[in-house]
Image (cartoon, rainbow, N blue to C red):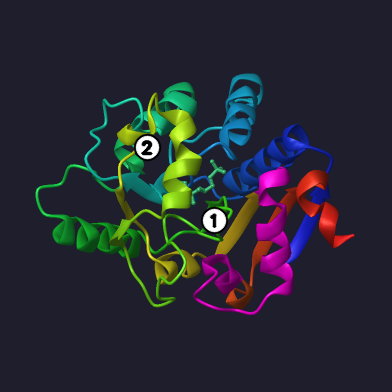
Amino acid sequence: MRIIEVKDYQQMSKRAAEYIINKVVQNPSIKLGLATGGTPIGTYKSLIEDHQKNGTSYQKVTTFNLDEYIGLSSDNKNSYRYFMNDHLFNYIDINKAKTNIPSGIAPDFQEECHRYEDIISRHGGIDLQILGIGSNGHIGFNEPGTSFGSKTHIVNLAPSTIQANARFFSRIEEVPTKAITMGISTILKSKEILLLISGEKKKDALCRLLNGKINESFPASVLKNHPCVTIIADKVAIADLE
Ligand code: F6R
């Protein structure tokens, strides 16, 4: 794993956006894996700024998001579909038909999991997957204990994840307790992974990722098995490692 250390959240976002833009310019039909949450918001903002200033085009790009809350439809402000439209897709020239997010309201969730795996495979897999990390080491919504062999599946969110995500909702009771997520093996099949880590709350997770063993009790540790992972982390998150 290669680590790029940057000063702060803003620099992380800028650097991550440059990284993504380079890949899009090199391969305009790139298949991007995208994440939601607080971490990539600045990166998406930088992508929009670049699109407006330099005209980087996303017309041929296909995207696959990691996850979606069960029970939230695309017009719910807390759904990840709404998030992606609101933080990125509405402001770049991407074809929304090429943006894929698992459905949180599918009539048959087992079927939806198969459909999602299948659509990723039919596109030849993900070229570059953007990831954040939970303080308990989750990637996507793969909580501690998830099998490294897992494919897209339904999960019960850990209390710590519900607590952490409550900041986006008006009341913690509104946070869904289940989600649909790409599995760990789905994520690992991406040709390249860009992991973004910022802030005090992620210090322990980064330390455990770099110094701990590869174990299902800390899902992100599986990234050490991947041949092409770049971490962009800010000084605060990296502090304990120096
Ligand atoms: C989001 C996702 C999650 C987040 C993680 C960190 O699509 O898959 O794994 O990346 O929960 O969230 P933030 O960035 O809000 O700290």
* Pointer 2 residue Cβ closer than 8 Å to ligand 1: yes
Question: Main structural element of the magenta stretch: helix, strand or loop?
Answer: helix
For this rendering, which residue is in front, 11 or 24? Answer: 11
Q: Quadrant of the C terminus?
A: bottom right
Residue mark closest to the camera, 1 vs 2: 2
Q: Which mark is residue 80?
A: 2
- The residue shown at (31%, 50%) is 179
- The residue shown at (40%, 47%) is 65
Let me know if residue 208 is in the magenta part.
yes
- The residue shown at (72%, 69%) is 210
Q: Quadrant of the N terminus?
A: bottom right
Q: Specify the quadrant of the image occupied by residue 156.
A: bottom left
Residue, disc 1: 128
Residue type (three-letter) at the residue carrying disc 1: Leu
Residue 154 horizontal side relative to residue 159, left or right: left
Residue 150 in the image: state x and y as whole percent: 36, 72
Helix, strand or loop at label 2? It is: helix
Residue type (three-letter) at the residue carrying disc 2: Tyr
- The residue shown at (31%, 59%) is 155
**Alpha-carbon neighbours of circle 1 within 10 Å: few (<14), some, or many (≥20)?**
many
Helix, strand or loop at label 1? It is: strand
Residue 165 in the image: state x and y as whole percent: 46, 39
In magenta, the rendered stretch is 197-223
Q: Is residue 122 above or below residue 165?
A: below
For this rendering, which residue is in front, 122 or 17? Answer: 17
Residue 36 appears in the figure: no
**Farthest-out residue, right:** 242
